Image (cartoon, helix red, strand yellow):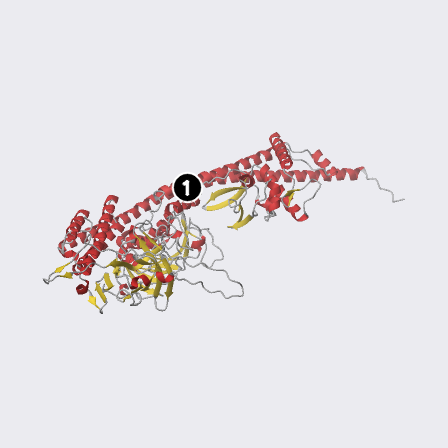
């Protein structure tokens, strides 16, 4: 027998009961205290939300007031710059009028057309010597006209179109004169051209912008048994060699090459003109509109959170009213039964409805499949797939049954490598898809987001995709300019997602459609001038009569007749050989039937890569690689060799933005009292330094260039248009257009509104502050620009750089540096609220600078702004 149990005394039982009551009372008090603390926390959250909304409204009112004031200042600076340019143009026209050179004003289409008619009717202008003198004058005239077209200033669109028509008329007449001069030379080929030997004659005339060379065999009789090589023509003054194929060893033609240093063809192509920048309105309108969108979205999110907090508050209040008695707590301690929290009727109904939906979904699930075959009920799924199937099935059932967003923690352990047969089981697909569906997990900004990857690429029924979208919804959210993706059961909607909408819009508007062989002149450019290559038939010569007079018969119009050489080249078919046999290139007999051309690259161009020869198709008005074959480039000799199947104008094309993106940039004030600004750029290949003074800009130094093409202009001041035009024509285009991001890899495209405001703010303080690039700029995204700045005016020792972040709603100095391990958007203490860079710099600058900024040099500010705006270094660095 075991030991006898001792019976507790009444005193001990009473003490235990009192202790249980005391513990229950303490627990009840603790629960009551926690509920009260939570109620206070909910109340504070609600009050904080109201305060944040009021603060946001007040900040936006201040933002609009400051922006309107700053925008008026910026517009006055831009207007002053425009007015000065208009006055300068009027002064240039007046000086040209006083020259009395009998040339029309380029800005007057009527006088230009009248002069063109006069020139076209001159008999003296039909001979080559006179033609070249006139053409040199008209090339300078057309250069001024092109400047008017590219910088119309206050000209109306109708007037610009008239200028373009006048330009085309002059160009057409110039080349018509070339043909007339050639005709008069070929009529007396033996006397007008230089006699090289008994058979051969040539001709050349060289001016500053035009070089014309011709070569021909005289049409003397030749024996059928006489053999001679096909003609090989070398024009060293132009830097071109032409080798004609076999048929021309007995076919008499005149080889003519006219080289012009400019490009009169490309601007008539449909891909030449730069698309206009899509506009959302003024800065104030854009900021106000998207702030309202952002506020509406934040209010919608907060209303949902407020509803949940209010529901929680009511539940906490209900628990307080229906607090369990001490007796029930004692009973709970003894029986260890859980005490159920009070639940209202609506919650019970929702739980019943949810459970019924889950049961219905489970009933609707089809049986698993194995190897695309239906498995019977008594069969089992393989162990490897079973766990994946049930985990995925449980997740999807939960997603469908819930009307709220899933917490990210609840699906942390979800298996993302769902196999094809498992998806077939879940989504009841009749036919197995051709490829797997992978759910990719993306971590961005420290937050987990999920997307369905490559959904549209699946070659399956649409119902399959609909089922996937039914379970996995992507909800773009907009929170302080950061885009997040959350899984939810609501329909996808875009609220304030300005970046996606705007980028999609500009890509559609700015993209240029081209034919398969057409050269896109937004991506490529023609450098080094144009080679007009023609094969011209001989003209019947004079015949002497017995009375020592001559007669010459001309059939048809008094004009040259060109030989339409066309050869459609088809490369030989590659024949498969045995593995043991050595592969030999197939014989190519057709390659020698093409015209071979060899061009020495012009030395006045900076060639950063081997160019590609292209031909101009007059009817389509396009540059094309069609009919160009067997391209070879000798880098040591700077010679390009190729073959063509047609005698057409030849151009050398290169990538337009071959020096983008930039690696670094810096802008700083010049020497004290010099009233200059120094601007340096480190491009992909070259390093450039500019000096901006007044309304002029000078290229001070150029490092790592491939030639000396720009050495004559170093240190010389030009207007922005002149300097940009010179650099572009020499192959150094560092001035991206509105659509350059479509053709530049590694760009960091920025919001044009934010970028433009930053450029103007930098220009306003360019004489007192130093600005530099930041590695965080590319990582900041489309809506934010990041850079460094510090005040240098009257500083004995330069301070450290401050990191500035600017977006659509504010500019601030962030607690971050170039050497920080991660970028932080948190502002430094006591920086205040500043809607743009100008207001920020005005607040942090010294009192001396704040006084000097009232009397700044408008010409210098305008020139700095317009020049750095052309480089767009925020978007391409």
In the image, 256 versus 372, the foreground residue is 256
Around disc 1, counting alpha carbons within 10 Å, would you say few (fewer than 14), some (14 to 19), or many (20 or more)?
some
Location of residue 328 (image quadrant): top right
Location of residue 608 (image quadrant): bottom left
Residue in the image at 49% along x and 40% along y: 48
Residue in the image at 48% along x and 37% along y: 300
The vertical placement of 216 against 485, above or below, is below
| Horizontal arrangement in the rendering, residue 332 relative to residue 468 (left or right) | right
Q: Where is residue 429 shown, x and y percent of the image?
A: 59, 40
Badge 1 marks a residue whose secondary structure is helix
In the image, 802 versus 96, the foreground residue is 96
Residue beneath disc 1: 291
| Horizontal arrangement in the rendering, residue 576 relative to residue 256 (left or right) | right
| Res. 741 visible in picture | yes
Q: Where is residue 585 shown, x and y percent of the image?
A: 45, 64
- In this rendering, the count of numbered labels is 1
């Amino acid at each position: 027998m075991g030991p006898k149990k001792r019976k507790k005394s009444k005193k001990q039982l009473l003490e235990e009961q009192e202790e249980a009551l005391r513990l229950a009372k303490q627990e009840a008090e603790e629960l009551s205290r926690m509920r009260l603390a939570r109620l206070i926390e909910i109340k504070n959250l609600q009050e904080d939300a109201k305060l944040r909304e009021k603060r946001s409204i007040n900040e936006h009112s201040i933002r609009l007031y400051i922006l309107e004031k700053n925008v008026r200042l910026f517009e006055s600076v831009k207007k002053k710059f425009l007015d000065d340019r208009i006055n300068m143009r009027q002064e240039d026209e007046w000086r040209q009028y006083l020259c009395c050179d009998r040339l029309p004003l380029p800005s007057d289409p009527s006088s230009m057309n009248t002069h063109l008619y006069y020139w076209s009717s001159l008999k003296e202008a039909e001979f080559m010597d006179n033609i070249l003198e006139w053409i040199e004058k008209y090339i300078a005239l057309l250069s001024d006209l092109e400047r008017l077209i590219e910088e119309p200033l206050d000209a109306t669109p109708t007037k610009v179109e008239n200028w373009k028509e006048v330009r085309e008329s002059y160009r057409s007449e110039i080349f018509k004169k070339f043909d007339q001069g050639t005709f008069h030379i070929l009529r007396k080929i033996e006397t007008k051209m230089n006699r090289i030997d008994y058979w051969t004659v040539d001709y050349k005339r060289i001016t500053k912008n035009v070089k014309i060379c011709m070569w021909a065999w005289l049409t003397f009789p030749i024996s059928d048994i006489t053999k001679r090589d096909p003609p090989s023509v070398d024009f060293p003054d132009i830097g071109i060699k032409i080798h004609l194929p076999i048929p021309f060893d007995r076919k008499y033609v005149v080889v003519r090459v006219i080289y012009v240093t400019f490009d009169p063809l490309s601007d008539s192509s449909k891909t030449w003109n730069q698309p206009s920048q899509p506009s959302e309105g003024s800065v104030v309108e854009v900021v106000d509109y998207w702030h309202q969108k952002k506020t509406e979205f934040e209010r919608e999110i907060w209303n949902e959170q407020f509803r949940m907090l209010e529901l929680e508050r009511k539940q906490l209040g209900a628990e307080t009213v229906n607090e369990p008695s001490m007796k029930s707590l004692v009973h709970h301690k003894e029986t260890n039964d859980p005490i159920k929290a009070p639940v209202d009727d609506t919650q019970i109904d929702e739980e019943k409805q949810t459970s019924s939906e889950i049961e219905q979904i489970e009933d609707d699930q089809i049986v698993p499949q194995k190897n695309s075959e239906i498995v019977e009920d008594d069969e089992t799924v393989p162990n490897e797939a079973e766990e994946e199937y049930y985990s995925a099935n449980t997740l999807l059932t939960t997603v469908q049954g819930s009307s709220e967003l899933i917490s990210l923690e609840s699906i942390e352990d979800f298996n993302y490598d769902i196999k094809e047969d498992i998806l077939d089981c879940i989504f009841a697909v009749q036919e197995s898809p051709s490829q797997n569906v992978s759910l990719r997990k993306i971590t961005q900004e420290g937050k987990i987001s999920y997307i369905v990857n490559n959904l549209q690429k699946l070659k399956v029924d649409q119902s399959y995709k609909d089922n996937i979208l039914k379970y996995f919804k992507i909800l773009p959210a907009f929170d302080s300019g950061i885009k997040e993706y959350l899984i939810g059961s609501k329909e996808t909607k875009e609220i304030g997602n300005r970046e996606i909408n705007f980028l999609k819009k500009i890509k559609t508007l700015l993209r240029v459609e081209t034919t398969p062989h057409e050269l896109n002149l937004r991506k490529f450019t023609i450098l080094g001038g144009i080679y007009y290559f023609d094969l011209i038939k001989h003209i019947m010569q004079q015949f002497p009569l017995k009375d020592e007079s001559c007669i010459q018969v001309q059939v048809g119009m008094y004009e040259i007749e060109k030989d339409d050489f066309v050869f459609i080249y088809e490369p030989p078919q590659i024949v498969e050989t045995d593995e043991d046999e050595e592969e030999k290139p197939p014989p190519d007999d057709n390659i020698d039937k093409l015209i071979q051309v060899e061009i020495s690259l012009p030395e006045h161009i900076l060639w950063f890569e081997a160019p590609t020869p292209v031909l101009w198709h007059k009817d389509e008005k396009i540059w094309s690689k069609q009919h160009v074959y067997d391209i070879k480039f000798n880098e040591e000799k700077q010679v390009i060799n190729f073959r063509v199947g047609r005698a057409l104008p030849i151009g050398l094309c290169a990538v337009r933005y071959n020096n983008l993106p930039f690696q670094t940039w810096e802008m700083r004030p010049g020497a004290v009292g010099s009233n200059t600004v120094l601007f340096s750029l480190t491009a992909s290949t070259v390093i450039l330094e500019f000096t901006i003074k007044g309304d002029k800009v000078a290229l001070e130094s150029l490092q790592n260039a491939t030639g000396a093409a720009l050495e004559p202009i170093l240190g010389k001041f030009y207007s922005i248009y002149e300097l940009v035009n010179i650099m572009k024509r020499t192959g150094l285009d560092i001035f991206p257009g509105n659509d350059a991001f479509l053709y530049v890899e590694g760009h960091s495209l920025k919001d044009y509104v934010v970028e433009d405001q930053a450029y103007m703010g930098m220009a306003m303080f360019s004489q007192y502050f130093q600005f530099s690039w930041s590695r965080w700029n590319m990582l900041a995204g489309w809506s934010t620009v990041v850079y460094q700045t510090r005040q240098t005016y009257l500083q004995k020792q330069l301070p450290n750089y401050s990191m500035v972040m600017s977006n659509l709603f504010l500019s601030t100095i962030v607690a971050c540096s170039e050497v920080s391990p991660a970028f932080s958007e948190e502002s430094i203490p006591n920086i205040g609220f500043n809607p743009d860079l100008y207001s920020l710099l005005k607040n942090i600058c010294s009192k001396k600078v704040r006084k000097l900024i009232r009397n700044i040099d408008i010409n210098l500010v305008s020139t700095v702004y317009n020049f750095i705006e052309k480089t767009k270094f925020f978007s391409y660095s």
